[in-house]
Image: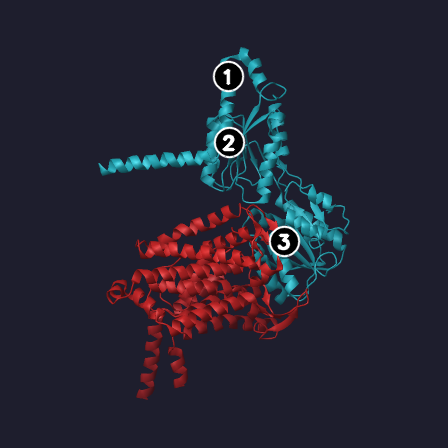
Chain colours: A red, B cyan
Amino acid sequence: MSKLKGLTKKQLFLPIFSMILVMLVNVVYDIACGNPPLSFFQIATQVTTSGDTILFGRLIDVLNRGSEVVILAIGMTLVVSASAGTDISVGSVMSLSGGLCCMLLAGYGVTNVDHYKVPLVVGILAGILLAIVCGIFNGFLVAYLNIQPMVATLILWSAGRAIGLLLCNSAIVYVRVPSFQFLGSYCGPIPTPILVAAVCVAITALILKFTAVGTFVQAVGINKKAARISGFNSSKIILICYAVCGLCAGIAGIVATSRIYSADTNNIGLNMELDAILAVALGGNSLGGGKFNLAGSIIGAYTIQAITTTLYALKVSSAQAPVYKAIVVILIVVIQAEPVKAYFKKLSAKKAAAKEAN
Amino acid sequence: MKKKVLSALLSVAMVATLLVGCGSSTEEAAAPAATEEAASTEEAAPAETEAAAEEEAAPAADGELITVGFAQVGHESDWRAACTQNYQDIFSAENGYELSFVDADNDNAAQIEAVRGFIQQELDYIIIAPIETAGWDTVLQEAQDAGIPVLIVDRSVDADPSLYEAHIGCDMVAEGEMAANWLAEYLNGEEAKILVIEGTVGASATLGRTEGFNNIAADHSEWEILDSQSGDFTQSGGQEVMESYIKSYSDFNVVVCQNDNEAYGAMDAMDAAGITYGVDGDVTIISFDATHDGLQYTLDGKISCNVECNPLQAVFADQVIKTLESGGTPDAETVVTDEAFVAPGITSALATTMTQEVLDGRAY
């Protein structure tokens, strides 16, 4: 009992609890429909048309489709923590990096190729590099010119996609080379986006664990001035956070582009910045900056995808889906709100007191 | 003092923006100027008409060019580019027209301003391919007050039909019906378990194609529409919805995608799940739009039927204007004839069978 109580006090308890709750809806639905109750969690192997064996199941779908938001959430968590603001340009930057990558691989003005014009690595690195430059631009505006993060990143939010369209000559550029599809398809039996997300998370987690970077970021986020007086270069730390956020957007953009082996600059990463911000919030992080929990953000990102996949599984009509999504999000945010937490604490304390009195 | 400097700077900036804005469309701007010139010569000196006529490259039968302003949506897709090219080809000097073309780049306000510009230039006809359906009453009234007939093409407008002469566009409902009629012919009474991947929620193409398909499906008791979800007209959307469908339904034989991009995504998802599709496969795919890439898939036998939305509408606009010129009343609603294309190996009374020549002969 006391162990259970200890568990509920952990910071990550509520985000994990919410995610499991979302998935449990499927179990209830499957029982109601007479399907095997755990079919949502079932992972099977499947032979593709080309003869490969891959993992197959809704849980794999959640992990696979949630990858881009997970990658974005890493950068967003750092940005939120250090600057107490959000980077709303990540979706556009995704589209921009994907657009540059495909434009280089296909050549300007060409919309359909089956061979690379420059080596694949050059295209991918250029796309990611451009995204980092975008991140540094945002970071410079926020850290050195003291422009509010939302206003500073609003510039690339609107311009990023437009530049991407210019690069692609306002068309969808298809790169129909099998190796280009690798990042968006399968690596052995596992969808590659899952691995990319896992590697990004692992690297970030290791850096945060074995260096003091996490502490620096939090110190700056809690009080920029105090951190500077204590000897941190606050502006530089904020700049680095935005650059990392740009890097994450670049990687997510390349993955999204690779999935559809084309640069659909109008649609790649559309509204994904909102999902990334929501992931940070659902993970129990304060959007006011300061302390952060990376694991929470990642769980938040998968929760968002779990909601989407669940709505598909429940056959909710696409016109109504946003309403259900909103209801679930409200519930998750409310149970994590401080006053609600305090209320339940008080309630349980009363119960304990009553027990003692007996 | 500071304020004065500021306002001066501001006005300089505004003028600069204006200039930049015009700079991108010098070609278009030049055309109406030439038109005005031609018009003024005509008014000032009727005796000189002959000389003026000689100056014109190739005047129409009655000796003067019909001036037409065309406010296009933008250049967002191959489809749109083909549409624009078609208007520029049909409304040429050889055919007796002087076309002022403005690309509004998907900016609603810019498009309305372009139409106002046409009214000020006192053109003979105005053609609008509206970006948004609402908000046209005022400017259409202005055109009517100026006595300039307006043609609405492509998408429709939400305004009193008396404010414009005619509407020319695709009938999305007819496209949906065409797809369903083809399916009925193809299956010939066999059972169908259908999955639909819809377009963007609320888009006219989505609503029309869904309605049309369902109209015909209602007459076929052997058909069952298992599910209908939105793939947002994108490839990744189509892929994600199809991935989910495959897990929910083990038994289906028809997939209807409301545009080509969704069909590409659906095919990728089926590939990954080991489901065969196309002419030789288990699943029949129907798609809409008939873009070049989409028709390539039809030619390869992967998309069984592809229903086009014809961008080549200018010839219909030309007919309406000719009717008005000769004093007649054109049809208020002209439906652009759409065509369906089927994969090689399928013969259909309702559709054209794809060949390499058909693909090469396409304008877009």
Characterize the local packing of mark 2: few (<14), some (14-19) or many (20 or more) Cα atoms within 10 angstroms.
some
Three-letter code, disc 2: Glu
- Pointer 1 indicates a residue of which chain? B
Three-letter code, disc 3: Asp
Query: Marks 3 and 2, how far apart in space?
Result: 37 Å
Q: Which residue is mark 1?
A: B41
In the image: residue A156, left or right of residue A257: left
- In the drawing, what numbered circle is on residue A114? 3
- In the drawing, what numbered circle is on residue A264? none
Secondary element at image label 3: loop
Query: Marks 1 and 2, how far apart in space?
Result: 21 Å
Q: Earlier in the sequence, mark 1 or mark 2?
A: 2
Which of A113/B138 is in front? A113
Secondary element at image label 2: helix
Characterize the local packing of mark 1: few (<14), some (14-19) or many (20 or more) Cα atoms within 10 angstroms.
some
Q: Residue at x 32, y 37 (%)?
A: B10
Q: Which residue is mark 2?
A: B28
Specify the farthest residue to the top.
B47
Specify the farthest residue to the bottom.
A358
Secondary element at image label 1: helix
